[in-house]
Amino acid sequence: MVEIITNILVYFLNITEYMTFFYVIFGKRKKQKIEKVFLIIVNLLFICFIGVKAYMGLTFLLALIASLICVIVIYDASRKELISLFFIAFPLISILENAIQYVCDYIFNRNESIVSITYLIFIISMLWIYYLLQGRKLDRDAFILPFKTNIIMSLLLFIIIAMYSYFTFALTEVLHLKRGILGMVLVEISGIVIFFVFLSMIYSFNVQRKYQMENELLERYNEQQKRYFELLLEKEQKTRQFRHDITNELIQIKNFANKERYKELQEYVTETLDDISFINRYNYDVGNEIINVILNYYLEPIKEQCKIEVEGFLPEETKISDRDLSIMVSNLITNAVEAVEKVKPEEKYISFHIKEAKLFTFITVKNTYVGERIGNMGGTLKSSKMDDRSHGFGLKNIKNIVERNDGEMVCRTENNQFIVEIRIKN
């Protein structure tokens, strides 16, 4: 009976260890709605565990499988991202466990049950202490690496685990330093150094890459602002020219009317109205100058090759800052434009709809696409683009802006269309 209770405790401590690691180190957070299948799967695994309780070696395997399932079901990220991170977490946690376990073996004289429970509780406690002291300052997106990079890092970590295990074996079995302070210190220091060096490398690499992408987004925003002011300047010049010529225009109109040259008068007035309409003309106009510039800048060049629908209205004054609005809408539109590039000409379609209601502002973007959209990434879907890292970052950036403005973002696919629905509180 004691053995069964011990196995159950170790089982759940292992799950808690991985859940804590993903929360504290990888910055993952709970989904808004957890699938009910989670409870069913965990219960089935628990029953399987009880059925094979006599085989101690299966406790670890079941706990590992259950940990992966819990991470996928509970945390708000795509399955592909969570699985790739799990391949990083497993060797890192194993290195840390081996280092702590070595000390526990030394203290508790190799009592396996006590050793397992002790080092698991110690690691979980240290992770939470680190989180309370420093971990909350970590960038939550700092451990999102491309899938291939994650696999390479995982393989490298597994090789290091093999070398570390051999190093421990040489100290304990060949050099017989199992009971010696020197062996314990060497194993402990090497394990902890490997753990923190790898975490630091991954964190530094990704933070640097994130800043590069943010700079690219900022440059894109600056380019849009430049285009915006160029259009304003062009309109201002047209307005000044019209004001300068308006007296002559009216004299000419009066002259045509006096001479009853009505056909020429009609043509002249039509031409004049065209010039006037240019001052406030947009092919795509939703009322907001910033969004108008973005829509016309990106959609105007492809309007002959793609069916485009733009509907709705948003006033100039909104709760959303100009910068957030520009980055959010430009990412939505550029993602849609890039997606339809691969679609057959007769199937190219982009729809942009915006509406300000009493409580919320609604934005919906639809576009046809070719390829597979993978998984759910906290309300977003990952792209099928070759550079899915950059594209996925754009979607995450949109989501961050939406959440920062008290909003929600949902992405889905329907009838070969990729749909982004945004709701922001006014």
Image (cartoon, rainbow, N blue to C red):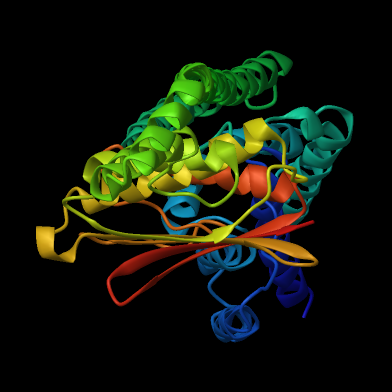
The structure residue drawn at horizontal position 43% and vertical position 65%, both measured from the top left corner, is 419
| Residue 388 higher or lower than 171, as above or below | below
| Residue occupying image coordinates x 49% and y 46% | 395
Seen from the viewer's position, the closer of residues 75 and 345 is 345
Tell me which corner region of the image, top left, top right, bottom left or bottom right, holds residue 373: bottom left
Q: Is residue 263 left or right of residue 89?
A: left
Q: Between 131 and 293, which is closer to the camera in this rendering?
A: 293
Q: Where is residue 415 in the image (x, y as percent from the top left)?
A: 30, 77
State whether residue 391 appears in this view. no
Quadrant of the image containing the C terminus: bottom right
Residue drawn at (50%, 16%), measured in percent from left and top? 244
Looking at the image, which residue is at 47% across and 31% down? 250
Relative to 181, residue 337 above or below: below
**Residue 418 visible in the current orientation:** yes
The quadrant of the image that shows the N terminus is: bottom right
- The quarter of the picture where residue 352 lies is bottom left
Q: Nearer the viewer, residue 144 or 115?
A: 144
Q: In this view, does 366 lie above or below 81?
A: below
